[in-house]
């Protein structure tokens, strides 16, 4: 269960704690979203018990929790890395680029990424946590905001391209998505090179 244990280590040093997570890194269509969340020291609310890894929540639960997080977090921000940038670059590096630029705008803090990669920055204590969205409430909240942003994007794209079934697979490469691409071809919102690599496996 996610807690404020990691956050407390930062708060004990009189530092802010920012949790960062992304959604749709390994996706075949649409944008990638990176979210940052920070809570006030010793923040408490019954709703915190609902905050967990976004993959363990339904679309409806994420849609309910996202506005609560935005209203109750001390700070939150969402970066969208659109498909054009992804097709021109690498999602591996792009998931950090906006966060790295953003980090230069905030005061000294502990900035923790979900996963096993962290940035280098002399101004901040940069760290990471494997399965951080199951450990830290800030990272879990960030995962919810990022995934909800992806859900909202897919809902819009499903209206524009109903033949691809984006609501069902959220843009990830599965049997239905592959079948739709083989029948209708790629759209401008597909990550063509990545999708093609997945088809070759």
Image (tube, rainbow, N blue to C red):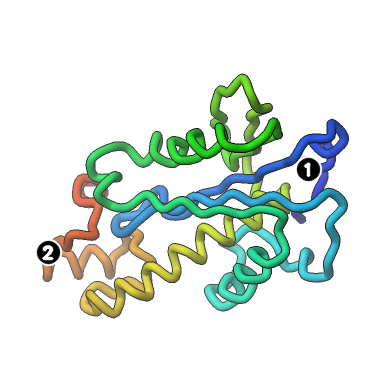
Q: CA–CA distance between discs 1 and 2?
A: 46 Å
Q: In which quarter of the image is residue 27?
A: bottom left
Q: How many labels does the image show?
A: 2
Instruction: Classify the position of the N terminus by image quarter.
Output: bottom right
Q: Residue at point 41% right, 53% down? A: 80
149 is higher (above) or lower (below) than 32: below
Answer few, some or many: residues within 10 Å of disc 2's Cα (few below 14, many 20 plus, some between 14 and 19): few
Answer few, some or many: residues within 10 Å of disc 1's Cα (few below 14, many 20 plus, some between 14 and 19): many
Q: Nearer the viewer, residue 167 or 157?
A: 157
51 is higher (above) or lower (below) than 23: below
Q: Is residue 25 rendered to the left or right of residue 124?
A: left
167 is higher (above) or lower (below) than 74: below
According to the image, label 1 marks what residue? 7
Q: Which of marks 1 and 2 is nearer the N terminus?
A: 1
Q: Which of 125 and 3 is in front in this view?
A: 125
Q: Residue at point 67% right, 70% down? A: 68
Q: Residue at point 54% right, 52% down? A: 35
Q: Residue at point 63% right, 29% down? A: 126
Q: What element carries label 2?
A: loop
Q: Is residue 170 rendered to the left or right of residue 10?
A: left
Question: Residue 185 shows which numbered tag?
Answer: 2
Q: What element carries label 1?
A: helix
Q: In which quarter of the image is residue 163?
A: bottom left
Looking at the picture, how far across and down is residue 91, in whole percent? 36, 41
Looking at the picture, how far across and down is residue 116, in whole percent? 57, 33
């Amino acid at each position: 269960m996610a807690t404020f244990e990691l956050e407390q280590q930062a708060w004990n040093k009189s530092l802010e704690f920012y949790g960062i997570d992304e959604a749709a890194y390994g996706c075949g269509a649409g944008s990638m979203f990176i979210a940052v969340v920070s809570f006030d020291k010793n923040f408490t609310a019954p709703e915190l018990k609902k905050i967990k890894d976004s993959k363990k929540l339904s679309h409806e639960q994420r849609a309910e929790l996202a506005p609560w997080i935005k209203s109750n977090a001390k700070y939150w921000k969402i970066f969208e890395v659109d498909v054009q940038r992804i097709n021109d670059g690498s999602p591996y590096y792009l998931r950090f680029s906006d966060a790295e630029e953003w980090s230069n705008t905030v005061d000294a803090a502990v900035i923790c990424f979900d996963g096993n990669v962290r940035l280098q920055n002399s101004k901040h204590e940069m760290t990471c946590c494997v399965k951080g969205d199951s450990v830290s409430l800030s990272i879990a909240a960030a995962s919810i905001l990022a995934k909800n942003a992806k859900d909202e994007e897919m809902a819009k794209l499903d209206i524009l391209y109903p033949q691809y079934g984006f609501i069902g697979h959220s843009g990830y490469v599965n049997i239905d998505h592959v079948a739709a691409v083989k029948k209708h071809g790629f759209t401008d919102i597909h990550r063509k090179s990545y999708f093609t690599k997945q088809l070759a496996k």
